[in-house]
Amino acid sequence: MRNRIGWLFWTVVLLAARFAAPAWAEEAEITVLNPQGIKPAIRLIPMAERTGTLDGKTIYIVDTKYPNTKPFVNELQKHLAKNYPQTTWVVKDKVGNYMEDDPKLWAEIKEKAQGAIVLIGH
Amino acid sequence: MPTVSIVTRRFEELARTTSYKKGVPNLRVSFVPHPITDRPAELCDQYLKGNDPISGQPLIRQIADGLAQKVSAEDAKSGFLEREPRPRLLQPGKPADIERMFHDNQWTDGLPIVMPTEERVAAMLKGTSHKPDEVVGVMRPSPPHEAWEFTVEMVAVNAVMAGARPEYLPTILAIASTGVTSLFSSTSSFARMVVVNGPVRNEIGMNTGIGALGPFNHANSTIGRAWTLISKNLGGSGKPGETFLGSQGNALTYNNLCFPETEEGLPEGWQPLHVQKGFKPEESVVSVFSGWSLNDIAWYSPLPQQEVIKNWLTHFFSFGTNRATLLLDPVVSTDLKDKGFKSKEEFSAWLAENSRTPGWLYWSTHTAELEQAKAGVEPYASYLKLGESDEVPVSRFIRGATARADGLVGVPSNTIEIVTVGGGTNTFWSGGDFSYVASASVDKWK
């Protein structure tokens, strides 16, 4: 009789452990560390003033020369010239590939133009 | 300067988020159908007669308005934009919910992670003498993107997530200190490779033998995986559409080809990679490479091994056409030494000097020379007579090479790297378009 009670006791204990432990583990809350790095501050760059009209102005169309996009650039210039004939639309190729900077061109635009369109592939 | 950007619609998210991060959140952008490359003029004309596919406004008028219409007070503001706060500890939660949140935030590689609890991160930090708040460096998805800064503790968090052990932390910190992301943002799908040299390979039990590049070793696997998690979480990389644009992605970036060089299998006179890069043999070093793909080759040929490798280099074609890295089994390295190549450098120079370029590939990458060839300018005119299927006697692997009638001119420095790795079970070698980027000391981070 004592043996049977003993077996029954341990069976109940084992069953409780089998079913209760995973439930307890699932419900326990944990605290973890943030895996992300530190993002830099963003300094706002005020947008340049616009005067309300393009008449009499020169606008550069900067071609960043993504491969085989020249037909689009040429068509863009045609459409702009047709719709805004009082504006001078100048297409300029940026030096190097589309990843390279071109400070000389930026200086030229500042000197000779009043606006720019920058084309980015693909 | 009043400016309007024109971007294809596929990159809307990239354009918006980049404008924000550059400090012009309302940058005037007009979108056109994607792609515009290789489209005939007639189709471009139709695009331009139509509407911006995102805003629905007539495209040409929208571009002109962007240049002319006055700027709002909001857009004329200066100062700083507030970023979301970065708490060191996240809100407590059940493990399953936290893991789900990490996946949803794209802080993982899609596989299960080890939860970076305070206890586990503290244990990981025992792997280095450096303070948790020491800045390790910065990393960014590609040059135009913003750089994120990170500390030793932040690297440890990601090392825990990857399943790494504390003794791997100096190697992982060294990789992170290079500032090189493993998830470079380009529409081509880059891969990365990290080669470990020096005593640390054996100290942490890396596999330098059979299956060194495969999923057979805890250190090789988790160190490589940690680089991907670091790139995402500390380098701001790997968010598709925003900070990752690789059209197909690259399966190699799950582990980034993390393996140790089999220094014990190097023939006499062949230096380990880190010694080639200026470190001492007794130093532990990681070296990172950038590329796209590998070919795995064991070719039984009556030709000597060097001829097989040279011919493969001539005809190997991938996104990177003028760079190569060879992973040679120790058996192959020893064979080559026996054939008379006294060092890696000697074999690399021989390959660069003797490999050629298939005609079709040469002319598709040398448009200016093609014009000269058509005008009868030598040596290009003679090259052109060879035809597209013949080999042009110009190597793709010599830096600063200039073509000459008798073949090659170039400086000794070339773009072929050689690493020895493997278990010596056969005459296997792998070759791919990887190029060396940087090395960093592991010892510095112990």
Image (cartoon, coloured by chain):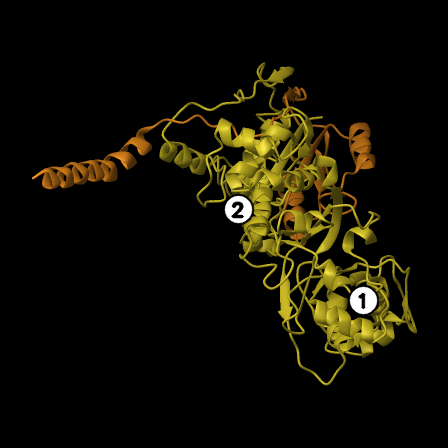
- The residue singled out by tag 1 in the image is B370
Give me the chain that's orange. Answer: A
Residue type at mark 1 is Leu
In this view, B361 is above or below B22: below
Point out the tag, 2 or 1, that comes first from the N-terminus: 2
Counting other residues with Cα less than 10 Å from the Cα at mark 1, is it few (<14), some (14-19), or many (20 or more)?
some
Q: Which of B91 and B53 is in front in this view?
A: B91
Q: Chain B is drawn in which colour?
A: yellow
- Which residue reaches farthest bottom? B302
Q: In this rendering, would B83 be left or right of A118?
A: left
Q: Position of residue B26 (x, y in %)?
A: 57, 25
- The residue singled out by tag 2 in the image is B33
Q: Where is residue B385 in the image (x, y as percent from the top left)?
A: 82, 78
In this view, B5 is above or below B202: above
Which quarter of the figure has residue A6?
Answer: top left
Which quarter of the figure has residue B370?
Answer: bottom right
Instruction: Decide if residue A67 is in sight here.
Output: yes
